[in-house]
Image (cartoon, rainbow, N blue to C red):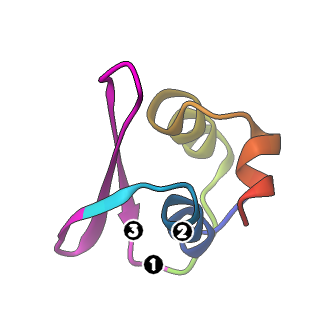
């Protein structure tokens, strides 16, 4: 499973925009069809555990594990 740092690195490499920073980083990405994707990244350095990672990747990032890995 990836770490929060790797998720942040993915967002920056994949063209996501940091639009707010508090105790978390908030990113968004506008797709060509106008859909806006959003994700929240913890400032922690630990690993994102199984079920939570699957939810973030599928529902927020909308990418495959292979695509995610290719951006790191």
Q: Secondary structure at mark 3?
A: strand
Q: Which mark is residue 4?
A: 2
Residue ID at (79%, 55%)? 69
| C-alpha span from label 3 to label 1 | 5 Å
Badge 3: residue crowd in 10 Å (few <14, some 14–19, many ≥20): some
* Relative to 68, 37 lies left or right: left
Which portion, as a residue range, is magenta? Answer: 19-44
| C-alpha span from label 3 to label 2 | 6 Å
Residue 41 is inside the magenta segment:
yes
Of labels 3 and 2, earlier in sequence is 2
Q: Which mark is residue 8?
A: none
Q: In this view of the protein, which residue sits in the foreground, 21 or 46? A: 21
* Relative to 24, 8 lies left or right: right
Query: Could you tell me which quadrant the C terminus lies in?
Result: bottom right
Q: Secondary structure at mark 2?
A: helix
Count of numbered badges drawn on the protein: 3
Query: Could you tell me which quadrant the N terminus lies in?
Result: bottom right
Q: Which residue is mark 1?
A: 44
Q: Are marks 3 and 1 in contact (CB under 8 Å)?
A: yes
Q: Are marks 1 and 2 in contact (CB under 8 Å)?
A: yes
Q: In this view of the protein, which residue sits in the foreground, 47 or 13? A: 13
* Relative to 62, 47 lies left or right: right
Q: Secondary structure at mark 1?
A: loop
Q: Position of residue 24 (x, y in %)?
A: 28, 69
Q: Position of residue 35 (x, y in %)?
A: 32, 24
Badge 1: residue crowd in 10 Å (few <14, some 14–19, many ≥20): few
Q: Which residue is mark 3?
A: 42
Q: Are marks 3 and 2 in contact (CB under 8 Å)?
A: yes
């Amino acid at each position: 499973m990836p770490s929060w740092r790797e998720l942040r690195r993915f967002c920056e490499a994949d063209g996501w925009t940091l639009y707010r920073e508090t105790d978390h980083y908030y990113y968004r990405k506008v797709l060509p069809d106008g859909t806006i994707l959003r994700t929240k990244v913890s400032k922690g350095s630990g690993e994102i555990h199984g079920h939570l990672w699957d939810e973030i990747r599928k529902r927020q990032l909308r990418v495959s594990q292979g695509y995610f890995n290719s951006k790191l």
